[in-house]
Image (spheres, grey):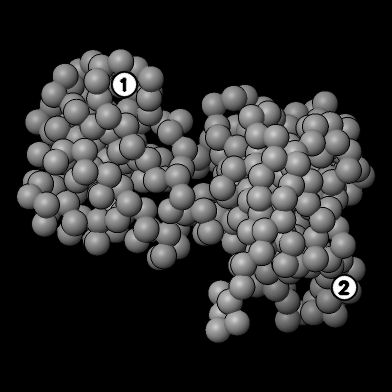
Amino acid sequence: MKILINDGMHPKGIELLKNAGHEVDTDFIPQNMLATQLNVFDAILVRSATQVRKELIDQNPNLKLIGRGGVGLDNIDVEYAKEKNIAVFNTPGASTRSVAELAIAHLFGMVRSLPMVNKKMSIDGMTDFKSLKKKASNGIELQGKTLGLIGFGRIAKETASIALGCGMKIIAFDPFIDEGDISLNLHSEYAFSHKIHIKTTSKAKVLTDSDFISLHIPGGQGYVLDKNEFNQMKDGVGIVNCARGGTISENALIEAIQSGKVRYVATDVFENEPPTDDRLLRMPHVGLSPHIGASTQEAQERVGIELAQSVIDYFK
């Protein structure tokens, strides 16, 4: 089969496909040129950049498989593809740990003013060191704080596992999941595994009782956090979003920051990527990263291998 890898793939994944006898093309084709150039391929493998929508599917009747290296499928018209007998695969578990670790990293950063300190130190740290130290000396600990999870899938549970190790309390809301286990794993010579059973609660309780709220949900469902939701939260709450842009109203979030309702913020995703509104970017206390949740070396290798194996198995 002839396979287009349009958004990149780990070399081990590419090697697997080639060794299985597939013809692999890794030359990027811009979105506006795919309609006329995809028709020579049997499969297309993408990440988040390339959109595989109904129109593109209709324009390329030879397409047999669409693969997404990652968790979400919001850039693919999945149901329509299946109606056309096109297989759709993703890699839901491969990047779980990487995204969870980034969410926790942002939590640690926000409570110790690291976003502000990092920005200020590089500008005037030498001349304003004492003043900067004073501003950053009112941090808090995560231990004993309540982390509310919106969404209770793989990544949320992995995030909870790390947070529990930090001494945090966990509550979670998921409209599709009533309960689940959080595994506590110690990866060392003294390795052990222990599971804690969690029953999910209402969204309202997560909003009102959490010291920090972390989103772990798919995109495409509109704002999950808007003005009404922010109004229900504790004063001084912290928000982390390493899920999808468009799940939080950035206008409502900015208003909540300015009013003092939200004290801590970190986001890996934005309503528009790259962001077209720089208000969040200019706020010194907001932690920022450019949609890199799954972008660790280990996760990329797992994603590449898992997706390649799915393609190989399908075309056997």
Q: Nearer the viewer, mark 1 or mark 2?
A: 1
**In the rendered image, is residue 252 in sight?**
no
Q: Position of residue 258 (x, y in %)?
A: 84, 42
Callout 1 environment at 10 Å: few (<14), some (14 to 19), or many (20+)?
few
Residue 53: name its quadrant.
top left
| Kind of element beneath mark 1 | helix
Query: Which residue shows up at 78% across the image and 51% down it?
Result: 170
Q: Mark 1 and mark 2: span between their CA atoms? A: 55 Å
| Kind of element beneath mark 2 | loop
Residue extending furthest toward the bottom: 189
Callout 2 environment at 10 Å: few (<14), some (14 to 19), or many (20+)?
few
Residue 192: name its quadrant.
bottom right
**In the rendered image, is residue 129 in sight?**
yes
Cβ–Cβ below 8 Å for labels 1 and 2? Answer: no
Q: Which residue is mark 1?
A: 82
Query: Which residue shows up at 70% across the image and 35% down it?
Result: 178
In the image, is 306 to the left or to the right of 41? Answer: right
Dot 2 amino acid type? Ser
Q: Which label sits on residue 137?
A: 2
Q: Is residue 249 above or below residue 84?
A: below
Dot 1 amino acid type? Lys
Of residues 40 and 250, the one nearer the viewer is 40
Which badge, 1 or 2, comes first in the chain's sequence? Answer: 1
Query: Which residue shows up at 23% across the image and 32% down it?
Result: 65
In the image, is 177 to the left or to the right of 233? Answer: left
Q: Is residue 255 above or below residue 92?
A: above
